[in-house]
Structures are given as C-alpha cells and as structure tokens.
Image: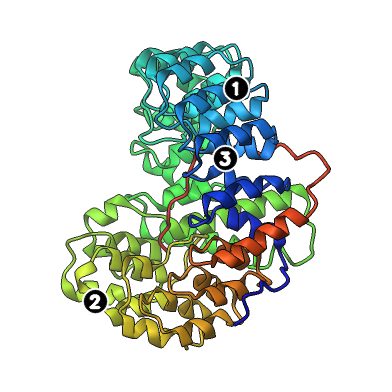
C-alpha cells in the first residue's frame, strides 16, 4: 500500500485527531502551532514540556490558550499564570481544569470580578469548603443559585442561608426536585412550613413534609404541575386524592400515581394505556408539520412521559420481585430483574424477556448465568431507551471465536464488535476497513492491530469521526504524520476571529440500561 496520504475529505478533523495522537513525537507537536485553525487537542496533551506550554501562551491564540487552561496535567506555575489571564473565558477554563489544584489558586479566583468564573467555582467540589461557603453571600444571584444547585452537602449554615435567600431563583435552586449532585439535601425541619408556603420552593419541600388531609387536598389542586407531581408520589397521600391525581391532565403527574405501590391494578392499567396512546408518533419531529406552541408542549410532555415509563425502576418491586416477574409492564419486570435473589428458572425466563431492558437488567444481575450465546443474543437485541455509548458487550466480552464470526455478520452493529478480537487477522482488518458502515470503519480506526497503511487510507474516510480516529491512532506511521504536518503548514489559518468556545459542563452522563 502506498506511503502517500490520499486527499483528505475532512482535513481539519484529521489534524485535530493528529494533535491528540499519543505517539506524536515532541518535535512534531510544536509544528502544529502554526496551524491557526483551532487545533485545541494539541494544548490538551498530557506530555507538553514547559517550553512548549510557554510558547502556547505566548502565541496568544484564544482556542489554544483556552484548551491549555482546561488541561488537567498543566503544571501549577502555568495554571496560576493563566488564573491572571485578562480573558474571563480563560480564567473560567482554569477553574474547570483545576481538579486537585492548590488552595492558592482558588483563593486567587474566589473574588474574580467575572460572575461566570465564580459560578464555575460554585460547581467545583475541589474548592476548599471555607472558600466555597463565601459564595453563599456572593452579590450575584446566579452565583448563589449555582451554589445551591451543585453543593448539595454544604454545611447547614450555608444551606439555611440559601434556602432563605431574598432572590426567588436562589431559593428555588436550594429547595428543588432535582439537583446536580447526589445525595439530595434535606431541608432543616424548622424551615419546612415556610418552604411549603413559598411558591418557588413548594414542589421541592413536599417530599420532606408529613401531609395531613387538608394540606394534601390543597396541594393536590396546586396550579403548579410540579407540586402535583410531588404530591402524587407522597406516601401520605389519601386514596381519594390518589385517584384524583391519576386523571391529572399532565402525564408526569399520572405517572407518579402509576409508580405507587398502593395504586389499584385497574388504575395502573388505565394510566399505562393513556401514556402509550398519547405519545406522539415516531416521526413527529421530522414529519414536516409545525404544531402550535400548546400542541408542541403537550407532545413533548407525552413523549417525555413515555420515555420515563420505559426507564422507571421501582425499589419496592425489586425488594419483593416474585409477584411482578410476569407483570404486563416492562418497567416492573425490569425492576424485578434487578433483584439478586431470584430463582434460577425465573432468571432464565427474564433473560429471554421480549423487552430489551428486562433482558439487560437481568443479565447485569445474574452475571454467572450469562454464557457467550446469551451475551451475544442480548447484545444483538439491545435497544436502549435513550442514547448511550454503552452496550451489553462492554460488560460481557465475547470470546474470540464469536468476534471473528461477527466480522461477517449482516448487522453492522455486530460487525462493529469484531475489532475487539486482540488477534484479529489482518485480512479481516482490511475488509472491515472498507465496510459500508462508518461505525465499523471507526472501530477499525481504533483497533490496536490496524496496520499503518490501512490507517492512512482511513485518513481520507468520508466520515469525520473515522478520519479523526485514524489520525489519533498511535500506530500511524511517522511518515504519514509528517505528511499531515506538511498539510497543516500549507493550509492558511483562519483570518476571522475565533469564536469564544463554551466551557464544558461538569455534569457527566452515565450509561443507561435498555
């Protein structure tokens, strides 16, 4: 195969991939600085020498400097230097990348004049508690609200101050139904009456209150649907109000009734049928129609309720699973499958359940009973309720003979697994590198056994992701790297101002079963 890199379809993405290649020689790293097109990956490398870091800062390119500030391997002296940078976006990035940074850095930034910097300090669990507590009295309400949402285990004096803040937005984040961190805080008991009386904290306070009949009746008729939703799930809810909320026009309220242990079977069945019947068709966002705002809102709520129904897991079912292993509701069967104490015949039945979520939940809780054939079957039929990169084969690695067979499988999802074979023959590597499905080619671009010549061909792949992965591969030859660097030096840099990039959120995703 030729040593010449073919014409690139996505040159910028390829160069960005090369910038993050762990095998890129140090002498080549500096050459990427000349490409002023936003090669942020080069500034996020963990192997940057001090003189290279100093040169990046001296270049004064926003993209490079911003990425450098996010680099968690940045030496302390340079992090402190960037904390004084005149651009607040750079100082904010310093906060985001400051995991394990010394106290001195946070002392310097805690009084930063830019609220965005202080907001990210409010999110960070790495800020010393005494410094972070100062943000509870920050002059900007957005900073205090961010602190209330993220610092769920703040000392009680801090939580009290936030729960009684003069600004509605701060109190709402301090007493909410959702926080950015677990575990969720419990408000001090003496504040609960005021929190329940306050419209902006009422929904968050409901679950922490004991409900008498009059309070339950009043809250069940609250105009705020979030309040009614919390009441619908409260253990003190009287049966007549439970039945009333089962007919609430907001599907999320009815769904909370569906999830109650004391809900009658007929009521549960009616709610289940309603949620499925009200969900919009699969193509509702792409069918060309433009619904008005009210219709669109109802469709969104109904679609969200359908998704919530699929992902619902009920601890009271898991605690007593046997009555529910044959439930007509997949979420009940999946909840039962999460038990570790099911009899072997029940486990076998749930491993063959018609619903992917049930099969997957059972496999994850009966690992010793999952052989390679079962693992392959469950992965082949895996249908997650929401987008995720996780798949059952990640937890149940398939043997080499199966992986090799899958290289010729009709389903591209299964062919994508073939490169996990540590001894995948080169002939199969080459065949899969020409696969019509980009996911399969991408798996080959990340496969440790992929030859340099194949990687060179994938650099010109029509898929951005595949081409970038090939450039990032440590097996890429030095000659191919040199050719890509020459391309970077030939391409003109962008003349327009680099747009200010958004600082990455600290909130991460987690794999969801499906």
The residue pinned by badge 3 equals 504
Using a 10 Å C-alpha cutoff, classify the residue at mark 1 as few (fewer than 14 neighbours), some (14 to 19) or many (20 or more): some
Check if mark 1's residue and mark 2's residue have beta carbons within 8 Å.
no
Callout 1: SS: helix
Whether residue 200 is visible here, answered yes or no, is no
For residue 150, above or below residue 322: above
Left or right of 386: which side holds 367? left
The residue pinned by badge 1 equals 142
Q: Position of residue 41 (x, y in %)?
A: 58, 48
Q: Nearer the viewer, residue 289 or 513?
A: 513
Dot label at residue 421: none
Using a 10 Å C-alpha cutoff, classify the residue at mark 2 as few (fewer than 14 neighbours), some (14 to 19) or many (20 or more): some
Q: Position of residue 355 (x, y in %)?
A: 41, 72
Using a 10 Å C-alpha cutoff, classify the residue at mark 3 as few (fewer than 14 neighbours), some (14 to 19) or many (20 or more): few
Q: Quadrant of the N terminus?
A: bottom right
Q: Nearer the viewer, residue 248 or 148?
A: 148
Q: What whole-number distance in Å separates the C-alpha atoms at marks 3 and 2?
A: 43 Å
Task: Please tell me which of labels 1 and 2 falls first in the chain.
Answer: 1
The residue pinned by badge 2 equals 348
Quadrant in the picture for residue 453: bottom right
Callout 2: SS: helix
């Amino acid at each position: 195969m030729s040593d010449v890199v073919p014409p690139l379809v996505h040159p910028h993405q390829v160069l960005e991939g090369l910038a993050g290649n762990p095998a890129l020689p140090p002498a080549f790293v500096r050459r990427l600085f000349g490409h002023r097109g936003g090669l942020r990956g080069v500034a996020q490398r963990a192997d940057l020498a001090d003189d290279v870091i100093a040169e990046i800062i001296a270049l004064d390119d926003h993209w490079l400097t911003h990425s450098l500030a996010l680099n968690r391997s940045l030496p302390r002296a340079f992090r402190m230097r960037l904390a004084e940078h005149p651009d607040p976006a750079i100082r904010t990035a310093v906060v985001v990348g400051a995991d394990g940074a010394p106290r001195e850095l946070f002392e310097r930034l805690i009084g930063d004049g830019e609220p965005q910097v202080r907001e990210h300090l409010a999110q960070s669990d790495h800020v010393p508690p005494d410094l972070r507590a100062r943000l509870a009295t920050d002059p900007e309400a957005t900073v205090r609200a961010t602190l209330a949402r993220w610092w769920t285990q703040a000392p009680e004096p801090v939580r009290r101050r936030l729960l009684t803040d003069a600004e509605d937005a701060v109190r709402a984040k301090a007493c909410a139904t959702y926080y950015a961190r677990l575990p969720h805080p419990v408000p001090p008991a003496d504040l609960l009456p005021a929190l329940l009386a306050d419209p902006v904290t009422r929904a968050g306070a409901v679950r922490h209150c004991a409900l008498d009949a009059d309070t339950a009746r009043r809250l069940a008729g609250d105009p705020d649907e979030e309040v009614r939703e919390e009441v619908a799930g409260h253990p003190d809810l009287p049966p007549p109000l439970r039945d009333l909320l089962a007919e609430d026009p907001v599907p999320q309220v009815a769904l909370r009734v569906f999830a109650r242990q004391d809900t009658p079977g007929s009521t549960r069945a009616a709610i289940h049928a309603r949620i499925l019947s009200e969900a919009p068709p699969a193509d509702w966002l792409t069918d060309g129609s433009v619904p008005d705002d009210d219709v669109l809102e109802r469709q969104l709520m109904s679609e969200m309720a359908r998704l919530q129904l699929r992902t619902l897991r009920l601890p009271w079912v898991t605690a007593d699973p046997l009555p529910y292993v044959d439930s007509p509701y997949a979420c009940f069967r999946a909840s039962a499958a999460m038990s570790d104490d099911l009899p072997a015949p029940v486990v076998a039945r749930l491993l063959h359940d018609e619903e992917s979520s049930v099969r997957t939940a059972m496999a994850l809780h009966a690992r010793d009973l999952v052989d390679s054939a079962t693992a392959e079957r469950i992965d082949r039929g895996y249908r997650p309720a929401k987008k995720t990169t996780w798949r059952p084969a990640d937890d149940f690695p398939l043997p080499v003979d199966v992986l090799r067979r899958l290289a010729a499988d009709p389903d591209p999802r299964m062919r994508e697994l073939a490169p996990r074979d540590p001894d995948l023959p080169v002939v199969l590597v080459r065949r899969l590198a020409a696969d019509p499905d980009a996911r399969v080619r991408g798996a080959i671009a990340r496969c440790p056994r992929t030859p340099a010549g194949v990687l060179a061909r994938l650099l010109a792949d029509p898929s951005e992701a595949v081409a970038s992965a090939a450039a990032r591969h440590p097996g890429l030859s030095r000659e191919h790297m040199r050719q890509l660097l020459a391309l970077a030096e030939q391409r003109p840099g962008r003349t327009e101002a680099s747009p200010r990039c958004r600082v990455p959120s600290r909130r991460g995703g987690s794999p969801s079963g499906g």
